[in-house]
Amino acid sequence: MGKTLKLTVKLKACKRCHAIVPAHMKVCPKCGSTEFGTIEGMVVVFDPERSVIAKLLKINAKGIYAQRVRDR
């Protein structure tokens, strides 16, 4: 059998828009905020126009979002 390569990326969530980004980022690429927290639940939005979950969470752009963001 072939070798398996396992990559680990630490993530954090923007407190303003709940976008999930790599831990090394200093500024949220979606809203420009610099306040981040830990992820509690994850949602992937492909079509925010038709997604009921996106409407409930007030998400208007596709991406990966935290359901809740807690202080670190």
Image (cartoon, helix red, strand yellow):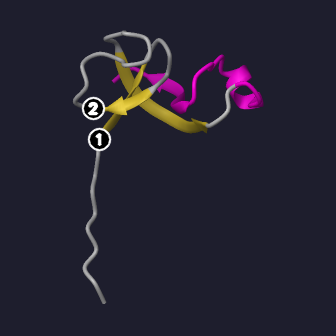
Mark 1 element type: loop
How crowded is the residue under tag 2: few (<14 C-alpha within 10 Å), some, or many (20+)?
some
Left or right: where does residue 29 sit relative to residue 45?
left
Quarter residue 49 falls in = top right
Indicate whether 44 appears above or below 20.
Answer: below
Q: Position of residue 3 (x, y in %)?
A: 25, 79
Closest to the observer: 63 or 39? 63
Mark 2 element type: loop
- Which residue is at 46% across, 25% downward? 19
Q: Marks 2 and 1: in contact by CB < 8 Å?
A: yes
Number of marks present in the image shown: 2
- Which residue is at 54% across, 38% downward? 42
Residue type pointed to by label 2? Ala
Residue type pointed to by label 1? Lys
Q: Position of residue 71 (x, y in %)?
A: 38, 20
Magenta residue check for 57 = yes
Left or right: where does residue 18 sit relative to residue 49?
left
Magenta residue check for 59 = yes
Indicate whether 37 appears above or below 6.
Answer: above
Indicate whether 58 appears above or below 65.
Answer: above
Please provide the residue range marked out in magenta.
49-72
Q: From the image, tell me which residue sits under label 2.
A: 23
Q: From the image, tell me which residue sits under label 1.
A: 10
Q: CA distance from mark 1 to mark 2?
A: 5 Å
- Which residue is at 28% across, 74% downward? 4
Give the position of the C terminus as an image quadrant.
Answer: top left
Quarter residue 36 falls in = top left
How crowded is the residue under tag 1: few (<14 C-alpha within 10 Å), some, or many (20+)?
few
